Structures are given as structure tokens and as C-alpha cells.
Image: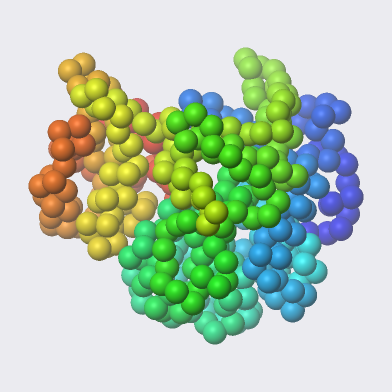
């Protein structure tokens, strides 16, 4: 990133903004990132360049990035996690390298060594691929921030045994990427999911239903949403942002518990389908990757919702059967699963997250 970018007050979009960006004073010096709300309505989050720099500085300090470090980008730059990697390299005045090849664990591992990458960010699926292929990390690598989803403990520990310095993180577009990230000191112990220490720039508190609220200098400015054919800017109207995430919060940090809007009623009980996904992955001894299955809540006239496991077509059928049988032995009534559905391919986002609304439309039709 060139210094001119940071000094330019013109708004820009990190990604393909189909229309012309509205000529609004509120959008000056803002970078727009596309995301979707719980309803699936596309919207753009406006983050000031100052917020992005504050976040970059905080992450660099937390991960001990210096001018001799090298940030390596292996995520889409139009997502805030990928953009943040480039911003951190600029803020630190260190080297920056971009992995532009098609994702292949062996190619990626060789690239890290060839360019002596010290810091990078990955999603859980990429870590799963590295572990599945038994690829060893190059000695130059100091930190791998894992975001965009939850890296299970079995895979995380296997990654560390192969030398991958994986660190669990928790963040979101509205926070210019990271809110909480494990420290380099945590690499001296076995990998755990949580708690995840909160970065010093953030204030946190719990709201109703254990919802996390955050405040800090890297918070988004507002959202740009298309109403009919007109783009309307909605400024953030409170210093505190309601994340819609349930968490445990203590002196050690954040323990994510899932999305509030992910909870569904089954036989009168609130159930989190994503927690069932985590359980199925654990029962597979991490043979299942996070992008190979999803549990979808389909409206049901009798039970309110039916929980349907949906698998990617490449999943071994015997493995699928064994996992579902293990799960069924201890699943109480509201958490019971219906017959599995197989999709080829399973719809995924650019970061490998299941597109739940699209999958629901496909299997519910």
C-alpha cells in the first residue's frame, strides 16, 4: 500500500462496488467492505482509514512485528482480514508479500520459506489442509493468526506439533478485523480455543443474553445499504456496537459461544446448529474440514425446526455414517438430526464459510 492511499480523502471500496460510490461527506476517508447482515441483505461497512491504521498498529504491537518482519497475505484482500494484513505491513514499515497462486498447501508452505514470511493470517480450512497433508511449517514463521471461524482444538494442536504457530483470534468487519487474539506466549502451551485476550484498544461488556458489546477507536463509522435503487448511509449512533455474538467474558479474555441470531427453536428449546457442527467435526477427529459440512435449521410444522446435516459431496460416505451414528447415541431429542443431504458443491464464501441462506434455499425447496 502506497502512502498516497492513506492520505487520499476520496472514499474507496475494497472489492467490486457495482454502482458509483455515493458522493457523501460522511464517506470521506472511508474504505467500504461488503458484508451481509443476519437477513442476508448485502451492505457495505464503512471503516475510516484512521480506524484501519489503529487496528494495524494494535495487532503489530501484540504480535511483536518489527521493520525486519514480513507479513504474508493468503486471504482475499477485499475482506477486512486480508486488507488488514496489507495495512499492518504498511504500518510497521516491513516487507509485504502476496500469495497469488491457487491455494495448495505444499505451494503455500514453499512460498512462506522462499520469501521468509514471519507473520500471516489463515482461515480454519487452510490450517486443516496443512495438517491433513502433514506439511511442516518453515522456521521463519512466527505467528499464524487464525480468523474467519473457529479452529478446533484437535486440528490446532496437530498444527502446532507440525510447527505452525497458530493463534486463535476473534474479530469482525465492524472492528477493522481483530478484537481479540492469542499472544505469542500462548505458543509455549498446547493450543486451546479460548479464552482469547482482548486487544488493548477495545472496551468490552456484556449485554442481554450474554451479547458482546464493543467500543474503541477502530470501530466502523456506519453502513451503506441499498434501499430500492438508492444507497442510504446509516451512521453509527452509539459508541458501543452490539455484535450479536454470545460470549463469556472474564479477565483472561473472550470465549465465543455463537451468534444470537443462529439460535433456533426445536421442540420448544433453543438450539445452536453451529455448536452441532463443531461436535460433528470433533467426533470425526478433525477428518472433516469446516467447509465440508453445515447443519441447517429447516422450518418444520410440528417441531418448529428440523436440523439437517448437509455434507459436501467429497466427504467419505462411511466416515459420514460413522460420525452421525456416534452423534445420535447421545443426542437429546431437540438436537437430533434428520437424514443427511449431500450437495455438490457445498456453497461457500470466498473465505470458505458455508453460505447458510443459500443452502437453506436449496434444501428447503
Residue 117 position (above or below residue 249): below
Colour scheme of the rendered structure: rainbow
Q: How many marks?
A: 0
Instruction: Kindly tell me whether residue 42 is visible in this rendering.
Output: yes
Residue 147 position (above or below residue 133): above
Image quadrant in which the N terminus is located: bottom right
Instruction: Kindly tell me whether residue 338 is visible in this rendering.
Output: no
Question: Looking at the image, which is closer to me, 80 or 268?
Answer: 268
Q: Quadrant of residue 200?
A: bottom right
- Compared across the picture, whether 155 is left or right of 301 comes to right
Residue 43 position (above or below residue 58): above
Question: Looking at the image, which is closer to me, 301 or 168?
Answer: 168
- Furthest-bottom residue in this view: 139
Q: Position of residue 57 (x, y in %)?
A: 75, 59
Q: Position of residue 280 (x, y in %)?
A: 25, 51
Residue drawn at x 83%, y 59% as measured from the top left? 2
- Furthest-front residue in this view: 251
- Compared across the picture, whether 235 is left or right of 155 comes to right
Residue drawn at x 16%, y 48% as measured from the top left? 327
Q: Position of residue 268 (x, y in %)?
A: 24, 22
Residue drawn at x 46%, y 50% as measured from the top left? 255
Q: Quadrant of residue 365?
A: top left
- Compared across the picture, whether 17 is left or right of 323 comes to right
Residue 136 position (above or below residue 301): below
Q: Position of residue 70 (x, y in %)?
A: 68, 73
- Compared across the picture, whether 152 is left or right of 205 comes to left
Amino acid at each position: 500500500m502506497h502512502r498516497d492511499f492513506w492520505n487520499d480523502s476520496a472514499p474507496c471500496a475494497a472489492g467490486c462496488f457495482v454502482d458509483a460510490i455515493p458522493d457523501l461527506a460522511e464517506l470521506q476517508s472511508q474504505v467500504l467492505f461488503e458484508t451481509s447482515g443476519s437477513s442476508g441483505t448485502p451492505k457495505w461497512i464503512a471503516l475510516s482509514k484512521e480506524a484501519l491504521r489503529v487496528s494495524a498498529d494494535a495487532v503489530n504491537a501484540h504480535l511483536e512485528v518489527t521493520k525486519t518482519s514480513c507479513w504474508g497475505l493468503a486471504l482475499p484482500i477485499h475482506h477486512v482480514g486480508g486488507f488488514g494484513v496489507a495495512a499492518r505491513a504498511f504500518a510497521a514499515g516491513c516487507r509485504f508479500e502476496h500469495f497469488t497462486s491457487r491455494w495448495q498447501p505444499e505451494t503455500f508452505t514453499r512460498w512462506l520459506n522462499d520469501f521468509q514470511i514471519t507473520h500471516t493470517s489463515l482461515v480454519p480450512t487452510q490450517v486443516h489442509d496443512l495438517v491433513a497433508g502433514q506439511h511442516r511449517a518453515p522456521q521463519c514463521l512466527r505467528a499464524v493468526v487464525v480468523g474467519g471461524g473457529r479452529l478446533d482444538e484437535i486440528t490446532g494442536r496437530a498444527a502446532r506439533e507440525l510447527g505452525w504457530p497458530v493463534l486463535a483470534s476473534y474479530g469482525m468487519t465492524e472492528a477493522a478485523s481483530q478484537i481479540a487474539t492469542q499472544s505469542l506466549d500462548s505458543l509455549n502451551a498446547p493450543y486451546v480455543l479460548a479464552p482469547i485476550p482482548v486487544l488493548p484498544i477495545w472496551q468490552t461488556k456484556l449485554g442481554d443474553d450474554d451479547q458482546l458489546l464493543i467500543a474503541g477507536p477502530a470501530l466502523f463509522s456506519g453502513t451503506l445499504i441499498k434501499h430500492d435503487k438508492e444507497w442510504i448511509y446509516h451512521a453509527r449512533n452509539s459508541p458501543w456496537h452490539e455484535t450479536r455474538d454470545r460470549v463469556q467474558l472474564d479477565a483472561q479474555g473472550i470465549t465465543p459461544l455463537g451468534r444470537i441470531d443462529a439460535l433456533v427453536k426445536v421442540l420448544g428449546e433453543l438450539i445452536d446448529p453451529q455448536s452441532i457442527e463443531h461436535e460433528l467435526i470433533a467426533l470425526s477427529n478433525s477428518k472433516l474440514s469446516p467447509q465440508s459440512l453445515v447443519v441447517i435449521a429447516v422450518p418444520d410444522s410440528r417441531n418448529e425446526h428440523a436440523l439437517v446435516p448437509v455434507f459436501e459431496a467429497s466427504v467419505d460416505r462411511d466416515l459420514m455414517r460413522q460420525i452421525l451414528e456416534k452423534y445420535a447415541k447421545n443426542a437429546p431429542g431437540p438436537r437430533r438430526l434428520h437424514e443427511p443431504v449431500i450437495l455438490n458443491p457445498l456453497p461457500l464464501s470466498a473465505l470458505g464459510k458455508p453460505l447458510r441462506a443459500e443452502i437453506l434455499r436449496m434444501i428447503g425447496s
